[in-house]
Image (cartoon, rainbow, N blue to C red):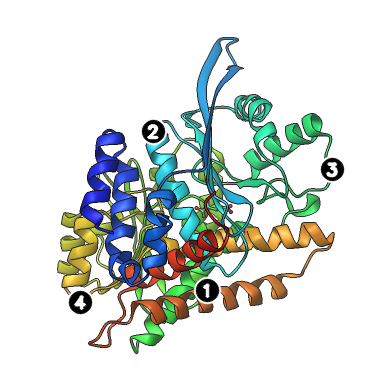
Amino acid sequence: MKTEAIMAKLQAKYPLEKEYLQAVQEVLESIEDVYNQHPEFEAAKIVERIVEPDRIFTFRVTWIDDRGEVQTNTGYRIQFNSAIGPYKGGLRFHKAVTPSMLKFLGFEQTFKNALTTLPMGGAKGGSDFDPVGKSDAEIMRFCQAFMLELWQCIGPDQDIPAGDVGVGGREIGFLYGMYKKLAREYNTGVLTGKGGTWGGSILRPEATGFGALYFTQHLLDKAGKTIEGKKVALSGFGNVAWGAATKATQLGAKVVAISGPDGVCHILDGITKEMIDYMLVMRASNRNKVEDMAVKFPGKAVFTPGKKAWSIPCDIALPCAFQNELSEDDAKELKANGCWCCCEVSNMGCQPGAIHFFQNNGILFAPGKAVNAGGVATSGLEMTQNAEHISWDAQEVDDKLHFIMKSIHEQCVKFGTQPDGHVDYVKGANIAGFMKVATAMLEQGIV
Ligand code: GLU
């Protein structure tokens, strides 16, 4: 297999799908050497098959806004790969959603889910619906209209969606209510990230951020460092950033920045419990403005419009917002300001130039598919609880999440340790995930 030749074919076939091509390129570059040691993979054309989704559903979603006007959006579900289990992955509601974005996310999800140790295939879905400025009633009507189409594509043993950007507990509630009415299935298994009283796992809302910090602890430990007292800059203020801020603070780090599309809040003395709680209020308001934190906590949070979290001096950078949010220039600014570690929490949060800069300048770096896998892993734990009709307490879920993040770190070390002894976490995560999915595909024949 030659990465260049496969990429040339994909580029010709999908010339406009930038994010998808970027995600595939990163994985193929990482696995090329290992792949070429396995002629049986080449014979079964595993790479050519693994880069294509199993199937894509596209549907029209029509709903009525608060002024009585008819609105039309496009909905998607991309079932990417089912080699190791039923399709599993989130739904993203964001105005910039395209098939390319969801294909990149579904592709990444396939390897991420393989790393979790749980039997889950990869999927992603969503819509170009923009939640910013929408009322709760509008969000409910949109979710119901979206589910009117989606329900026939999903099922507890078939495809289990969850949240992602723009889809949290509120949206999962509306989606689930409509699914039940349509499917007449009442066993709680079809979506994860549900409310605690109707099948949701305790700690699922926190899990992506908590898991990211557990992974960061293992990475720092391996490098002979600790997190106590370190300054952490994180981007975003949604569910993932909230969980990361909570756990980083519990572990003794000082969160000095959060950000939004409007700019950055420098948090002078480190984030407090009240500020972390306020992040939830900001998310629920649908305003999408981080400036609200500075208005609520004057003198403690200082807002600068148009700037990113990466402009605030820190030890550890945690991108928690959106793909490609951290550029090579941002990476240089981080280094100039003293940053020495970046754990990517968002999916593909760092541009390729930023990753190469980190790797070539001795900055510890780990990719999203390893760092953020605690979210979908806890979704997997929610599925287990649903299937057994029981619920575990917080300690049990947290212990299992700890175990999974430790195992993901071990897989990265196993497959990513280089001849000079340093760990290439990008290679480690990609090779570990790929080997598991590719082996399963091989054993299941040409399908
Ligand atoms: N959207 C999350 C992710 O990127 C969670 C998916 C899930 O829980 O299924 O992994």
* Quarter of the figure with the N terminus: bottom left
Say what secondary structure mark 4 lies in.
loop
Type of amino acid at the residue the image marks with label 2: Ala
Q: CA distance from mark 1 to mark 2?
A: 31 Å
Q: Position of residue 349 (x, y in %)?
A: 34, 54
Ligand 1 within 8 angstroms of badge 3 C-beta? no
Look at 45% across and 68% down and name the residue there: 435
- The residue pinned by badge 2 equals 96
Q: Are marks 1 and 2 in contact (CB under 8 Å)?
A: no
Residue 380 lies left or right of residue 301; in this view the side is right
- The residue pinned by badge 1 equals 405
Q: Nearer the viewer, residue 47 or 135?
A: 47
Q: CA distance from mark 3 to mark 1?
A: 32 Å
In this figure, what is the number of numbered marks?
4
Q: CA distance from mark 2 to mark 3?
A: 33 Å
Decide: few, some or many residues near mark 1? Use Cα within 10 Å; few <14, some 14-19, many ≥20. Answer: many
Decide: few, some or many residues near mark 3? Use Cα within 10 Å; few <14, some 14-19, many ≥20. Answer: few
Decide: few, some or many residues near mark 2? Use Cα within 10 Å; few <14, some 14-19, many ≥20. Answer: few
Say what secondary structure mark 2 lies in.
loop
Q: Position of residue 32 (x, y in %)?
A: 29, 65
The answer to whether residue 15 shows anywhere in this view is yes
Pick whichever of labels 1 and 2 is earlier in the sequence: 2
> In the image, which disc is placed on residue 186?
3
- The residue pinned by badge 4 equals 362
Please tell me whether mark 2 or mark 3 is closer to you in this view.
Answer: 3
Type of amino acid at the residue the image marks with label 1: Met
Q: CA distance from mark 4 to mark 1?
A: 23 Å
The answer to whether residue 246 shows anywhere in this view is no
Q: CA distance from mark 2 to mark 4?
A: 34 Å
Q: Nearer the viewer, residue 185 or 45?
A: 45
